[in-house]
Amino acid sequence: MNTESVSSRNLRALLILMVLCGSLLGGAFSVGQDSWIAVLFIGVFYLPLILIYSRICSLFPGKNLFDIIQDLFGNIGGALTFLLLTFYTVIVTALQLRNFTELTAVVSLNETPKIPIMIILLLPVMYIAKGGITLIGRWAIITCAIIVINIFLTLIFSFNIIDITNLLPMMDHSFTEISSDAFSLGAIAVGETVMVMGLMGQLQKKDSPYKVFLPGVLIGVGLFALVLMRNILVLGTDLEQEAKFSTYMAVRIINVGSFFERVESLISLSLILLGFTKMAVFLSTASMGAARLFKIENHTRFIIPISLLILAVGSIVFKSAFEMYETARVYWAFALPFQVLIPVALWVTAEIKVRKGRNADFSAITQAPAPTQD
């Protein structure tokens, strides 16, 4: 039995990092200076989904996503769902691994073959995932602090070079265009937080899932919008869209003497830390799904074989950073069943089961024989 526990603060930090991980794909936005507005739309459009995730977890305190699936869908339905979710987590982790491999190649190792870079990036992810929810939670707190400090420092240091006119004209694109970008990138930035439900079984009993998901996601969305706004103010619309990794390029332009030259390398490291965090969550949940599928108690036994599978898929998933952005724009169609359909089916089934349970309890009370008097 798993006796590990994690606080709501740690899981909120984890959610913030998972949302911010979407900033790596800022170049996938097609609405230019309105991209930061599209990010704010993400928080609105995906709010009902976050409420559904929270409701499911609140109905089953002390149980993770896979426990809930087993309870609601039974053995056959549960096994099929475990298989689908394991497939999904493997693909997403492979995509994330390749995304950060492309970033590493652009930043400093452009002549190095992709496979060695992927192996180097995957090893810390395996270590974090193997350490369990306690290590993941502590890692998230430390990494979140580093990322948030970096965001505000770079924003302060960029005051002398920002051009406020880069944000004009606001709402120059149609509502449909902005909404389309919001749905596409939201599937990566917010929709993928569905797999945090796999860790919610270890949430401390005093904490509410609503107080984890809502603040974590909304703070993450706000910081994501701030990052994109900074990038546009520094780079301008055209350069921000042309740059492979606009977040890194914006930081390179900021100049505060020799001190910031050293900090610049820390920014690229911070982006990699984001990738480690998100991949560790998905690798951990993938191993959980595989363990439940094969009815094995210790899910960490699957971390190495699943990592090898992720490495294989990541090496062929796309050929370049340009294909990476094209994949990001159509990713929502692939993710829809896993982020929306399965959770909604769980939610509806859970509500029906809870209502039937309450009705049964009420009937038992009303039909109980009255106590006899001596």
Image (cartoon, rainbow, N blue to C red):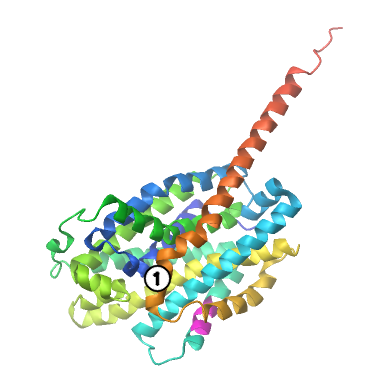
Residue appearing at x 47%, y 56% in the figure: 191
Vertical order, 269 against 68 (above or below)? below
Which residue does the numbered mark 1 point to in the structure image?
A: 326
- The image shows residue 303 at horizontal and vertical percentages of 64, 73
- The image shows residue 63 at horizontal and vertical percentages of 64, 50
Closer to the camera, 256 or 47? 47
Vertical order, 232 against 337 (above or below)? below
- Name the image quarter holding residue 365: top right
Report the amino acid beneath label 1.
Glu
Closer to the camera, 307 or 1? 307
Residue appearing at x 59%, y 41% in the figure: 348
Q: What stretch is highlighted in magenta?
A: 118-124
The image quadrant where one finds the C terminus is top right
SS category of the residue bearing label 1: helix
- Name the image quarter holding residue 183: bottom left
Judged from this view, the residue extending furthest toward the right is 374
Residue appearing at x 81%, y 15% in the figure: 369
Whether residue 185 sits left or right of residue 38 in the image: it is right
